[in-house]
Image: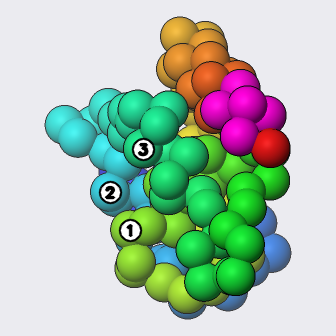
Amino acid sequence: MNIIEFVNNNINNTTCEFKQEIAKLLEAFITDGNLVYPISDPKTMYGNLLYKDRPNPRVKTTNMRNILRYFVSRTRTTNNGNAVSKATDMLMGAATTQQKFYYKNLSDEVNKIIKNRR
């Protein structure tokens, strides 16, 4: 099944343009028909989540979905937040238990760094 078929089968009652935006986002995470999720270092992830444009940079605690959403938003294929959220939810739903475990551990590590720096 290709990406367009996957999107069409999993999203109802939306415009064709919205489905195309989601398909573009998902393309970045599919290699040879398999879902590939980015891997990151907790310290690097913490630095990426900082609100650097503020006088006192801070970061809120996060969870595995928010970290995956960050990676999806970095593909820069769309500025549509709804498409990014929908693609993130689809990727999270298609993730294996091992992938979810990795993102859960990554979010826990990032949250430890956040709490230690407060």
Residue found 73% across the figure and 57% down from its top: 59
Residue at numbered disc 3: 44
Say few, some or many: other residues with alpha carbon within 10 Å of mark 1 (under 14 / 14 to 19 / 20 or more). some
Foreground: 1 or 88?
Answer: 88
Residue found 70% across the figure and 49% down from its top: 66
Instruction: Look at label 2 and name its amino acid.
Output: Ala
Q: Is residue 72 magenta?
A: no
Foreground: 29 or 59?
Answer: 59
Question: Do the CB atoms of the residues marked 3 and 1 lie less than 8 Å apart?
Answer: no
Q: CA distance from mark 3 to mark 1?
A: 17 Å
Q: Is residue 35 above or below residue 9?
A: above
Q: Is residue 20 visible?
A: yes
Of tags 3 and 1, which is closer to the observer?
A: 3
- Mark 3: which secondary structure? helix
Say few, some or many: other residues with alpha carbon within 10 Å of mark 2 (under 14 / 14 to 19 / 20 or more). some
Instruction: Look at label 3 and name its amino acid.
Output: Thr
- Mark 1: which secondary structure? loop
Q: Is residue 48 above or below residue 14?
A: above
Residue found 69% across the figure and 82% down from its top: 54
Across and down, in percent, residue 105 comes to 62, 18
Which region shows up in magenta? 112-117
Q: Quadrant of residue 115?
A: top right
| Image quadrant in which the C terminus is located | top right
Question: Do the CB atoms of the residues marked 2 and 1 lie less than 8 Å apart?
Answer: yes
Residue at numbered disc 2: 28
Q: Residue furthest left?
A: 32
Of tags 3 and 2, which is closer to the observer?
A: 3
Q: Is 59 left or right of 53, judged from the image as shown?
A: right
